Image (cartoon, helix red, strand yellow):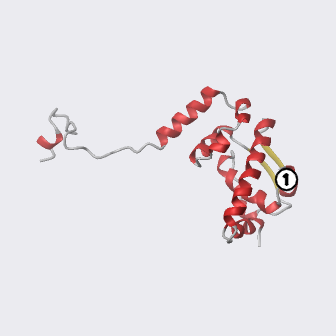
Amino acid sequence: MTIIDKWNEKLESKDAAEFYNKYLETETTAYKIILSEKNPYLKGTVKELSERFSMEDWVFAGFMDGINTSLKEKTDIASLSIDTELDCEVDFNKLYYNMLNAKAQWLYTLDEWDNILTMEQRAEIKKQFTIDHTAVRNKVGRNDPCICGSGKKYKKCCGQ
């Protein structure tokens, strides 16, 4: 059993909700450390990094699973062991975007972001997030101008 398997097993157990609520506090602390240090690099073995963030190794594997999409190069989470040497770089812009996507307000509103991204940069990322998640209708409506360019309404032209 790999350490990520232990994480997944815990998430499927009957006390998963209680565990996950405690994990969110641990996760928040880890992000506060990462952001306050302004150092995008996570270097060291899984054991060293899990100790640095006061997590068990399998909990750190779950943390890595969550942050993986915010890294410049993804890590193979399934192959993690306590001796795996990590050399990851966090893309702070992606991290902020992904926190918005996860609706993790407790993370994207951390004061530590002030030292990483300006208010303007965060506003730009939020704007892009909104654009990316806005539904776009591709269907021509009956009362829209006709797609052929005649100037007539679609229902009176090609829509008949």
Residue 61 is situated, as x and y percent measured from the top left of the image, at 75, 59
Please tell me in which quadrant of the rendered image residue 60 appears: bottom right
Left or right placement of residue 34 versus residue 94 in this view: right
Amino acid, disc 1? Ser
Residue name at image x 72 percent, y 34 percent:
111
Q: Quadrant of the N terminus?
A: bottom right
Can residue 95 be seen in the rendering of this structure? Answer: no
Left or right placement of residue 17 versus residue 156 in this view: right
Left or right placement of residue 45 versus residue 153 in this view: right
Please tell me in which quadrant of the rendered image residue 148 appears: top left
Can residue 20 be seen in the rendering of this structure? Answer: yes
Residue assigned mark 1 = 54
Residue 108 is situated, as x and y percent measured from the top left of the image, at 65, 40
Q: Nearer the viewer, residue 89 or 123?
A: 123
Total label count? 1
Crowding around mark 1 (Cα neighbors within 10 Å: few <14, some 14 to 19, many 20+) is: some
Q: Give the SS element for disc 1.
A: loop
Left or right placement of residue 41 versus residue 124 in this view: right
Residue name at image x 61 percent, y 32 percent:
122
Residue 38 is situated, as x and y percent measured from the top left of the image, at 78, 35
Residue name at image x 77 percent, y 52 percent:
26
Residue 20 is situated, as x and y percent measured from the top left of the image, at 69, 59
5 above or below 63? Answer: below
Residue name at image x 57 percent, y 35 percent:
125
19 above or below 27? Answer: below
